[in-house]
Image (cartoon, rainbow, N blue to C red):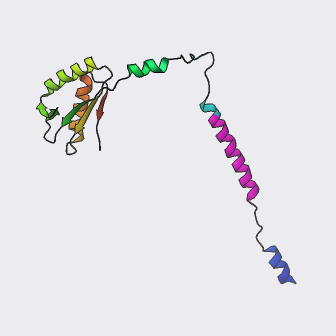
Amino acid sequence: MRSRRSMRDSQVPEVNLVPMMDVLMTVLTFFIIISMTLTGQQIVNVRLPQDVAGADEEVSEEVTQIEALVVGLDQDGNLVLDSETITFNQLAQRTRRYFTENPNGKLILKADRELTYAEVSTLLTDLREIGGNRVSLAVE
């Protein structure tokens, strides 16, 4: 008889995980819903303007495609603009003229991958100092 009792006492009780998973899913759903409602929060005492009829037509006329000024930097460190090698002073003049004519224009630097980061970074910094606040580095 003792052996039968010891077998019953030594059994591991089973834990039912389904109620615990239900509670966790409910809490998770609650936090998801709360986070979604907070992202669309409105600011108190701020009224946004109403949509104006015909405003889209005016905007589309004003937006024109401005071609970017593309500057190349070859592996020898030479500046290339419009397929010709130029000096930094010539580039500075062309860049100033470009940004004067196109205030919303952008300058794209295409540097050779063999150049060091320091060389490319120095040129990017110099181009930004010239007045080009929209200077980008092209990558493949």
Q: Residue furthest right?
A: 1
Residue 28, how many percent across, how many down?
67, 45
**Main SS, magenta residues:** helix
In the rendered structure, does residue 33 fall within the stretch colored magenta?
Answer: yes
Is the residue 6 above or below the residue 92 in the image? below
Residue at x-position 12% and y-position 28%: 87
Residue at x-position 45% and y-position 20%: 57
- Please tell me which residue lies in front, 77 or 15: 77
Residue at x-position 43% and y-position 20%: 59
Q: Quadrant of the C terminus?
A: top left
| Quarter of the view holding residue 122 | top left
- Please tell me which residue lies in front, 79 or 63: 63
Residue 26, how many percent across, how many down?
72, 46
| Quarter of the view holding residue 117 | top left
- Please tell me which residue lies in front, 127 or 66: 66
Start-end of magenta stretch: 11-36
Is the residue 92 above or below the residue 24 in the image? above
